Amino acid sequence: MKTRAFKQVDVFTEVPYLGNPLAVVLDGSGLATEEMQHFTNWTNLSEATFLLPPTQPGADYKVRIFCPGRELPFAGHPTLGSCHAWLEAGGQPRGEHIVQECGVGLVKLRRDGQRLAFAAPPLRKGGPLPEDDVALIARGLGVARGDITAHAWCDNGPNWRGVMLKSADQVLALKPDAAILAGLDIGVVGPRGKVGVVGPSTQDDIAFEVRAFFPGNNGMAEDPVTGSLNAALAQWLIGVGLAPERYIASQGTALGRAGRVHVERSGADIWIGGGSVTCIDGQVTL
């Protein structure tokens, strides 16, 4: 074991403890996969990341992303939080964009004022869900099948199934049934008032309320703020004309958080951005 630089970062918020926390080990060299997984499980957070020297040309750093029980090829809040920690520790990008190497390949990031944003990676699977899945999800969410107004595969590493309900209030009222939804990663989105081109960050500017449900140790777990899901939702919703090319999504409300995900299509890229705040800065023995 050795002492390694460590940060705990709150992501998709500019106010500490209102976003989604992430453990970042800034030097993962020499650690076996099993050691990374064991530490991740011990943190009791939704994800932990380990920064390493890049192995692909053009990358500024490499990150390995773990959640309890498994390694992920990509995840959004770990991407933003890891980049925030890398820059704060003195990292210098080689080009105009910061380039992260991870399981899905190279991911571009940019500074967006006080926020960071990543370019959404390509979907591994898109298009409508099978009707049997939609009916099952409706039962598991406790809503009528007709309340699901649109649906799609939202697989960009995590195998999300996305559904849209009629309103944000309906999304916030959900009490999913873990037995019915066992084994499924579900992203639920609902419009909040009129959807249009939105400005910086007041409640009236929120276009959608988002919730993310997935299998947990004690039934169905809920993620506070989910970058991968919001990236896939944006690709789906903007692509089919259900969302404007620039909007803000709220997530975490039902958990007492106030996550804000800033979405913008620019050219061929859809950028997913948010604030990050370092809450713990120190060392860890690993």
Image (spheres, grey):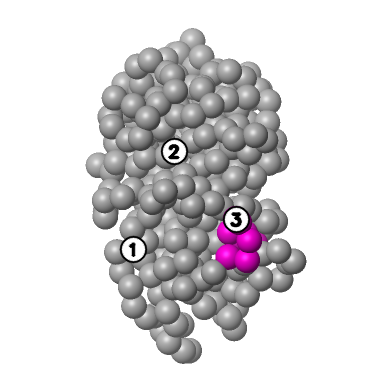
Per the image, the residue denoted by label 1 is 278
Q: From the top left corner, tell me how far across and down residue 61 is, in percent.
A: 60, 68
Q: CA distance from mark 1 to mark 3?
A: 22 Å
Q: Earlier in the sequence, mark 2 or mark 3?
A: 3
State whether residue 283 is above or below residue 240.
below
Q: Do the numbered discs 2 and 1 sit on residues whose CB atoms are within 8 Å?
A: no
Res. 97 mark: 3
State whether residue 166 is above or below residue 76.
above
Per the image, the residue denoted by label 2 is 262
Residue found 43% across the figure and 87% down from its top: 3
Q: Amino acid at mark 2?
A: His
* Disc 2 secondary structure class: strand
Q: Amino acid at mark 1?
A: Thr
Task: Give residue 169's quadrant in the image.
Answer: top left
Q: Earlier in the sequence, mark 1 or mark 3?
A: 3
Which region of the structure is painted magenta? 93-102
